[in-house]
Amino acid sequence: MTRIGFLGTGIMGLPMAANIAAAGFDVRAWNRTRARAEPLTGRGVEVVDTAREAVNGADVVVTMLADGPAVDEAVAGAGLANGRLWLQMSTVGVEWAAALARVADKAGAVYVDAPVLGTREPAEAGALVVLASGPDDVRERAAPVFDAVGSRTVWVGEAGAGSRLKLTANAWVLSLTNALAESLALAGSLGLDPALFLEAIKGGAMDAPYARTKGTAMIEDRFPPSFPARLAAKDARLVLDAGGDDVDLAGVRATLAHLDAAVGAGFGDEDLGVLHRAVRRNHAT
């Protein structure tokens, strides 16, 4: 049985580790706060106290942590063996994707940069989209793990290309969320029921399942965390850093401003749709 060392069992990592175990892998999981990993003990996963314990004897290492520094720290504490396959699935941005590739190269590990598209619900359903990038000759080794967590895998080139595509997708979803919040807030300010906006776009070219899900949460002002606002703000900064001076990412900048306001008001652990409160200025606190 292939052994997996899984590092990071947050909102996304916990269901991913559980799904990998359900697919028949021997999974050892570690999280900096052990209590957040404990639910896995009833789902066929061995929860351990240190990253090194999780990685020791593993054939494959999976990292699913908040950001590049967190991944770097965890891997440094775990140790990577020569020839070990490392599936780096966190959203870390362009610079950290390259830095972690150098960490793998120094350790002699095989590095696959493979962030995912999706939030908590598709993670729980094993329906994420994996944006994989790395050596062609490891695709067969990586496929069973990717199949356990995702509905499909898109291979996009050399290591690092996956992170670049993830930022591209994040630019879209962040700007879409902000535009949705602005439209709903504008409807309310004009004396309309914001739900009429969702009704107006229903079934047409402007409609999207995402708009209906997030829009309903905004109207109801309920934001159980699927993609926490504080992590969305982190990702928005990664997108802006990647764009640099080459692309005017005004939509992402506006989104980040609203996310920062929401996080600053104490809503950082709620879903990113909570930026709607910052758009509605009189409800920002």
Image: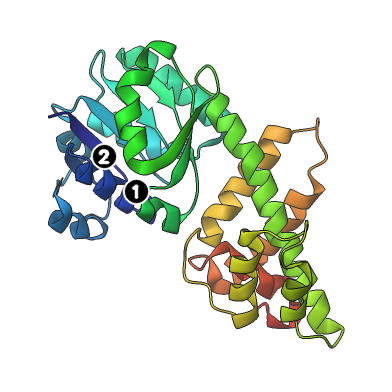
**Residue shown at 75% from the left, 77% from the top:** 281
Q: Residue furthest front?
A: 203
Please report contact status of discs 1 and 2: CB closer than 8 Å, yes or no. yes
**Residue shown at 58% from the left, 65% from the top:** 263
Left or right: residue 163 versus residue 87 is: right
* Quadrant in which the N terminus appears: top left
As drawn, 10 above or below 25: below
Mark 2, secondary structure of its residue: strand
As drawn, 17 above or below 243: below
Q: Local crowd at mark 1 within 10 Å, few (<14), some, or many (≥20)?
A: many
Q: Please name the amino acid that badge 2 sits on.
A: Phe
Q: Distance between the Cα atoms at labels 1 and 2?
A: 8 Å
In the image, which disc is placed on residue 13?
A: 1
Left or right: residue 59 versus residue 243 is: left
**Residue shown at 17% from the left, 39% from the top:** 24
Camera sees residue 155: yes
User: In this figure, which residue is indicated by the disc labeled 2?
Assistant: 6
